[in-house]
Image (spheres, rainbow, N blue to C red):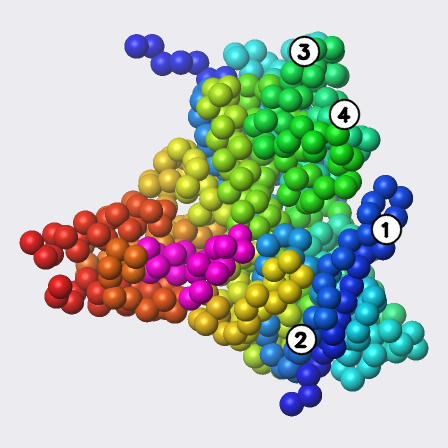
Amino acid sequence: MTPIIQTENLSFTYPASEGRLALPVFENLSLEIEAGSFTAVIGPNGCGKSTLAKHFNAVLLPSGGKVWVAGMDSSDEEKLLDIRREIGMVFQNPDNQIVANVVEEDVAFAPENLGVPSPEIRKRVDDALKTVGMYEYREHAPHLLSGGQKQRIAIAGVLAMRPRCIVLDEPTAMLDPRGREEVVSTITRLNREQGITVVLITHHMREAVSADRVVVMHKGGILTDGSPREVFSQVELLRKAGLDVPQTTDLLYSLRNAGWDLPLDALTIEECAKAIAAALQSNN
Amino acid sequence: MAPTKPIIEIKDLTHTYSPGTPFEHTAVSHINLAFHAGELAGVIGHTGSGKSTLIQHLNGLLKPTSGQVLFQGEDIWKDKKFIHSIRGRVGLVFQYPEYQLFEETCWKDIAFGPKNQGISGDELDARVRRAAGFVGISEELLEKSPFDISGGQKRRVAIAGVIAMEPDVLILDEPTAGLDAAGRDAILENIRAYQQAQNAAVIMVSHSMEEVAELCGRLIVMNKGSVSMDGTPAEVFTHADELTEMGLSVPQVTSVFARLRAMGLDLPADVYTVRYAVARLLERKEDRSC
């Protein structure tokens, strides 16, 4: 299985600029993202996860080592457009991503620039807006929408490109619970039904639970890497790194410390409830 | 004992954006709310429910289309002088406040607000240091450029800038957005510290049900421009189905308990923090083994 994204001994330092010191972020980081997978990358602020994500579609270029995207070297200038076509990126702040005065024109921006024929653009725009639940706003002005609505437009804009992989850098930071749920279920659906590779940088542990794989970053390195169950069971490790665990895990962990015999990897509400019910009903 | 008067009140507030244009939109409609000194209230609601519109009326950034905002019983728009003074008495911290930092040093940035209130000299320095103390900004950091510090530190400097004006009402719009667990805990602790020291009324807009459950004694739920629920977290979180329909959720631990009750176990319905959940479950286990 060829990885769609591969970093090889990746090193990166933000260069010094006026009033700012040079900032080394990571050194010799090697990571592979499999095509068709759903990976969540979590870590405390400053661990390098956003910096890493920006290497995936050549927004940033390595200081050392290499990044391969769909078999292309990210530092190859001639391949830049191809790389950007394969990997779509959604950032945290929607205001930085919206360019048009009308919602549907903003969503159409990318396919238009890619030379997609008009009827196909229409279809893609409609599909993308319906996927994010903003179809009835297609003729509205983006700057008059609320933060969460704007963010869904930004996501639609990326979806309209039909990229092979979507990298999302804390896309739900400004959304309400339903908005978060919609984004995560949307990208989960895109991953499961259309095989689009998803890399989700997030602070919300509940979102990471939906992924196949969780990579935990800390101070520019990978602290642990595995399935959500494997990763979130390591409560002490995560807490020491300044991270949270889902409330379900927190609950089970606290009860275990009180002597209860409970699994730590019952992540979902249903599993957690079942485990607790069983423990309550068992004899001492 | 006579009930204390509210420090800030909203009376029949309606606000319509872009009236008379194709983009006309009534964001909040006939809102009535009162807040008292020492209260810590959370405002939750789906995006577009009117939360931001509502809070921007409290410090006069927005003017009501109809209705009134009263500070200590007086209409904040009664005259120019009063509305000016309101900015110092009602402090509003926007989302991602670190984007507002601009000065050469953190000290200067924090001093900006109180300076505009006419404070100078030793008093100004005291205010800056007190505010920095609330948010855990060291003396050393005060001398640095706000652009040379981490995101979490920037956030705290920005909040200190508002706290330095010593507002009676402190409003924060998603103060923990984008922060990691350690950063979140620190900010929430800072807010609590300020509230207790000043007996300020604190209003927090948040999308994190777990956070407001932990911190707030009162939850106001906004839905499509109106107040749909107003009560304690225990009261509000028992309405899980309605909350879900409104685009909100309940803390995970509340859902776990709902599931356990659906399985036939007799457990309380007012659980919304892990701490409380653990206590209740340990009690239950004790009871059963007696």
Which of the labelled discs sits on residue B108, or is there none? 4
- The residue at the point 22 percent across, 52 percent down is B282
Name the mark nearer the viewer: 2 or 1. Answer: 1
- Residue A16's tag is 1
**Does label 2 or label 1 sit earlier along the sequence?**
1
Task: Pick the residue in front: A25 or B288.
Answer: A25
Q: Amino acid at mark 1?
A: Ala
Sooner in the amino-acid sequence: mark 3 or mark 4: 4
Q: Amino acid at mark 4?
A: Lys
SS at circle 4? helix
Q: Residue at x 76, y 25 (%)?
A: B108
Which residue lies under the disc numbered 3?
B123
User: The disc labelled 3 sits on which kind of residue?
Assistant: Glu
As measured in the structure, the alpha-carbon distance from the residue carrying label 4 to the one carrying label 1 is 24 Å
Q: Position of residue B50 (x, y in %)?
A: 58, 39
Q: Nearer the viewer, residue B201 or B45?
A: B201
